[in-house]
Image (cartoon, rainbow, N blue to C red):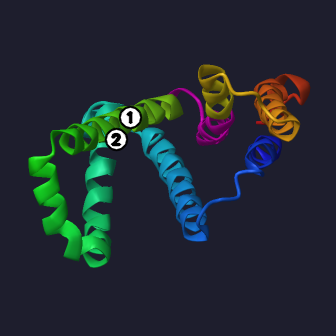
Amino acid sequence: LVPVIGGVVLASVKELDFAVSALIAASVANLFAAIKANENKKVMDTAGLKERIGSVGNQYAITTILACLMSAPLVAWAEGAKLGQFWTLFQTNPIVKFNVLASGLYFYGYNELATLTIKKTSAVTQSVANTAKRVIVIVGVALVLGESLAPLKLLGCSIGIGGVFLYSLADQIWKPKKKEA
């Protein structure tokens, strides 16, 4: 994971026009996403899950509902005074309405897919893929917009993608120790 994170840092190092509060918020969000992924994997491995709640999709839905209920007081405290303005804008501006609904549906779909991925792999694999996604987005955007990549950004992207490649080969390079009975 370290080469992947290092690659993302190198690829982003010139982008220093950001708010520190946004960096802290994103780091906290990533921390809780990793905790959620780990806890979801534990629940998936619990015997009898399918009989209790059905599919992994149902598990993700329950997790999302609980997260919404737990974060609602914080949102009300931080943004409650602006809720009336937002609601008016949401009702009167079709672009805002579409963007809010579409981003919510895309976010839900992406995260449900991530939860299904955890079932097939592990929380660490999903975390590596989530981190690598940032490098892939940087390269993809540069290709789509026809931008050239600065040498440092290209080096960071290469290290990040190489780190993902090494992670995918780790079990073949370093054979896991067999558990003795």
Q: In the image, what residue occupies the spot 76% across and 31% down?
A: 164
Residue located beneath label 2 in the image: 60
Residue 121 falls within the magenta-colored stretch: yes
The tag on residue 129 is: none
Residue 23 falls within the magenta-colored stretch: no
Q: In the image, what residue occupies the spot 29% across and 69% down?
A: 75
Q: Where does residue 113 sit, x and y in percent of width and height?
A: 43, 30
The answer to whether residue 106 is left or right of residue 42 is left
Q: Which amino acid type corresponds to the residue marked 1 in the rendered image?
A: Glu
Distance, label 2 to label 1, CA atoms, is 6 Å
> Foreground: 147 or 169?
147
Residue located beneath label 1 in the image: 112
**How many C-alpha atoms fall within 10 Å of the one at disc 1: few (<14), some, or many (≥20)?**
some
Q: Nearer the viewer, mark 2 or mark 1?
A: 1
Q: Which amino acid type corresponds to the residue marked 2 in the rendered image?
A: Tyr
Q: In the image, what residue occupies the spot 66% across and 34% down?
A: 138
Determine the main secondary structure of the stretch shown in magenta: helix
Query: Where is 21 relative to 15, above or below?
Result: below
Quadrant of the image containing the C terminus: top right
Which is nearer the N-term, disc 2 or disc 1?
2
Q: Where does residue 46 sit, x and y in percent of width and height?
A: 44, 42
Which segment did they paint magenta? 120-135
The answer to whether residue 55 is left or right of residue 133 is left
Q: Where does residue 16 sit, x and y in percent of width and height?
A: 70, 58
**Residue 93 showing in the rendered view:** yes
Q: Are marks 2 and 1 in contact (CB under 8 Å)?
A: yes
Q: Where does residue 33 sit, x and y in percent of width and height?
A: 51, 52
> Foreground: 129 or 44?
129
Asked which secondary structure carries label 1, the reply is helix
